[in-house]
Image (spheres, rainbow, N blue to C red):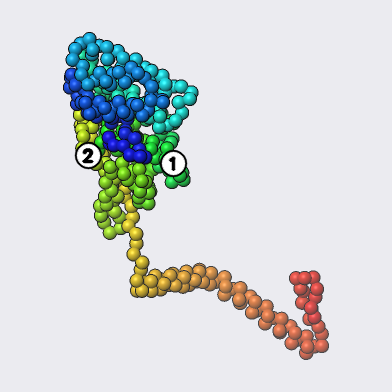
Amino acid sequence: MLRRTCFARVHLFSALVPQVKVQAPHFLSVEDLATAKAALEERKPYIDYPELVQCIEALGNIDNARKKSDVTKKLSRCVDALRAQLYHKDSTDPRRRLELHEAVMAAGFYERVISVTQLEGEGIRYVMNHFNFDVRRDTLITQKVHEALSKEKTTTPESEQLLRDLLLLERRLTGKYRFSQFGGRRWFALGTPLSEIKTEEEVQRLLGISVIKSDGNFTLGEVDSGKLWKTITIRPNEEQNATFAEVGNIFKDTRETDTTFELRVQKPQKPPDFWERLRETLLRYWVLWFAAWVTFFMVDEEIITLVALIFLKHRQTKILEEEAQKSGSKVYIASSVGRSRE
């Protein structure tokens, strides 16, 4: 997670909070401190809080109660200032908003782990609650992620970077428990409910997105469920470092099936061979013949009666014409068009 390329910067939250389990007085090592300061320097145009930088520098060695109190107060002010920035009218960039949330979580985490008055694990609970209730409900972020995952939309470098940061944040917080239920629903990177993934093609499309392929840390599996069906599985892998959910024992009662997404799909059918095609053809023609046979015998009495009436009428007309010819008279037959016929 802590890597930088010419296309991507270091993930902010992973840089600020490289370890879930921290101990006084050195809450950050020398190397981690340098990485955190570099990450804040890169984002100085929109996260410009000197007090936050001072607090990060102080985390390298907090060896007395006065320093703890001073850093805790500064971190509290930073949390309030960062939260206030989220409500600014011009704060509309989804990726910058996500990084502001990450800065809030990092500052709130250290504020609680440093303070001696906080309960053990309070920092972890703060981070998880902020992610579940603030980040999840930030519609500017979730809508942009949904567009990045949508089939109808074309991804941009900005949307891909936002999706990458969100995936890394989810991995840092929940690891293999990313598919656990929240609010009765299970989500794929906050942008797509797992219940909306209905086909194998949709699974392949999502996992084929370049950002998900490189930073998603998913495993795609397939289980044979019978002659006609198979089960597609997506499983988030375990992370190398301990996650917040694991250290806080948040998902201790979660079943193994709740950490994996399963989709049951029908297997593609093999093309029928010659004898199967012949059998289908004969069956089709037999059904047509049987339907015609049944139809005929259902109305056979009406057909016979109609034919008999036509024949009798024709026969009676011939008899009248023969008698008229013998007697030298004429026969007049009424016509439906209003003209008589001799």
Look at label 2 and name its amino acid: Glu
Quadrant of image for the N terminus: top left
Residue 337: percent from left, percent from top: 77, 70
Q: Which amino acid does the dot numbered 1 rest on?
A: Thr
For the residue labelled by badge 1, is the local secondary structure a helix, a strand or a loop? loop
Give residue 217's quadrant in the image.
top left
Label 2 packing within 10 angstroms: few (<14), some (14-19), many (20+): some
| Residue mark closest to the camera, 2 vs 1 | 1
Judging by the rendered image, the residue that carries numbered circle 2 is: 238
At 65% from the left and 76% from the top, the residue drawn is: 310
For the residue pair 166 and 135, the one nearer the viewer reads as 166
Element marked by disc 2: loop
For this rendering, which residue is in front, 108 or 203? 108
Q: State which quadrant residue 301 falls in.
A: bottom right
User: Is any atom of residue 186 visible in this view?
Assistant: no
289 relative position to 319: left or right: left
Task: From the viewer's side, name the closer residue of 301 and 219.
Answer: 219
